[in-house]
Image: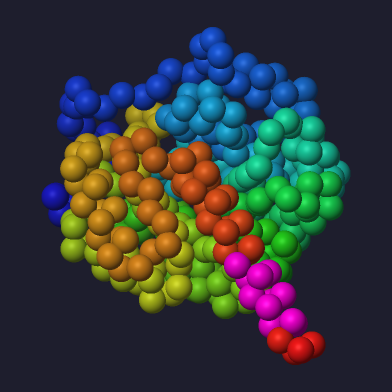
Amino acid sequence: APSSRPAVGAPMPARPAWFRVPAPGGPNTHFATIQASLRELNLHTVCEEAQCPNIGECWNGGTGTIMLLGDTCTRGCRFCAVKTSAAPPPPDPEEPFNTAAAIAQWPDLNYIVLTSVDRDDIADGGSSHFALTVSYLKQLQPHLLVECLVSDFAGNLPATAALANSGLDVYAHNIETVARLTPLVRDRRATYTQSLAALRHAKAAGPEGMYTKTSIMLGLGETVEEVRETLRDLRENDVDVVTFGQYLRPTEHHLSVLEYVTPEAFAEYKSMAEGMGFKYVASGPMVRSSYKAGEYFLESKIKEERKAREQAKAAKEQESQA
């Protein structure tokens, strides 16, 4: 694998013949229904705002990732197409309830991902806004599993802890890339160590059974050994779930792709991560953090572990009464 630096406007390799992106829409899919529902309810999805290449596969299958706190980010990462501003419009105070009420109307929904832009202009980075949304969701749909894919809250650990204890099931924060490439790929306010600290604190502060999750983009010049080191760092900080996907340039104003990582290499990274003890690993060119295949797995895993804890608790209570 190359050990080089990504840059805007650099030459890119030709896209391999095996690399295919599913087209959105088509008969017998949920795409049009989800799109219409989002418009009607004035909800944003990261799928659209970040021009995610998986929008066809996930929406066709009925999965969407809801974006809170508006559509304008206070940071300017070099891989992301979400619009930016130092002073975005203030958050809608009605959004937590309206979002929860809208999601509760969606049929056959078992797992929802909430995410947002970075909001460094808000004291707690939007943590309380997320927590309120989760609280309303759990009131309306107690059995719904909720994943929050959030920022590092600018290193605000009390904000991290507050969200970790809001009732969510999966606390996700993306480290995005290896340590060497972080200053080139992410906004200067998003550091590698700050992301590790956020993930570690969420796990330590959250309730038993809450999963932590992160995602790594490949194809930006990272080496196999750098990925291995990143995985070691994540496990040392008690991260449960990791996903690997191919970086795709959203526009010509963003970092160029340096390498199209082969399916065989993705399989090797999956084996590497599983060997280190991650509870679940999704790895493939089109995998993204909020990827529906991973959600299906996590849903069953969380419910299975919750049932085991409840059974153990009931057995303990019976013993104490005997």
Question: In this view, which residue lies farthest toward the front?
Answer: 322
**Visual colour scheme:** rainbow
Which residue does the image show at 57% across and 59% down from the upper left? 304
Vertical side of 316 occupied by 128: above or below: above
| Quadrant occupied by the C terminus | bottom right
Q: Which residues are magenta?
A: 308-318
Q: Splitting the image into 4 quarters, where does residue 309 fall?
A: bottom right
Which residue does the image show at 56% across and 18% down from the upper left? 29
Q: Splitting the image into 4 quarters, where does residue 14 fall?
A: top left
Res 125 seen here: no
- Give the percent coordinates (x, y) of residue 252: 35, 29
Q: Splitting the image into 4 quarters, where does residue 196 fall?
A: bottom left
Task: Tell me: 161 left or right of 58.
Answer: right
The question of residue 313 being in magenta is answered with yes
The question of residue 193 being in magenta is answered with no
Which residue is more in the foreground, 102 or 314? 314
Task: Tell me: 301 left or right of 142.
Answer: left
Which residue does the image show at 75% across and 37% down from the upper left? 103
Task: Tell me: 41 left or right of 227.
Answer: right
- Give the percent coordinates (x, y) of residue 135: 79, 56
Vertical side of 264 occupied by 269: above or below: below
- Give the percent coordinates (x, y) of residue 74: 59, 49
Which residue is more in the foreground, 158 or 73? 158
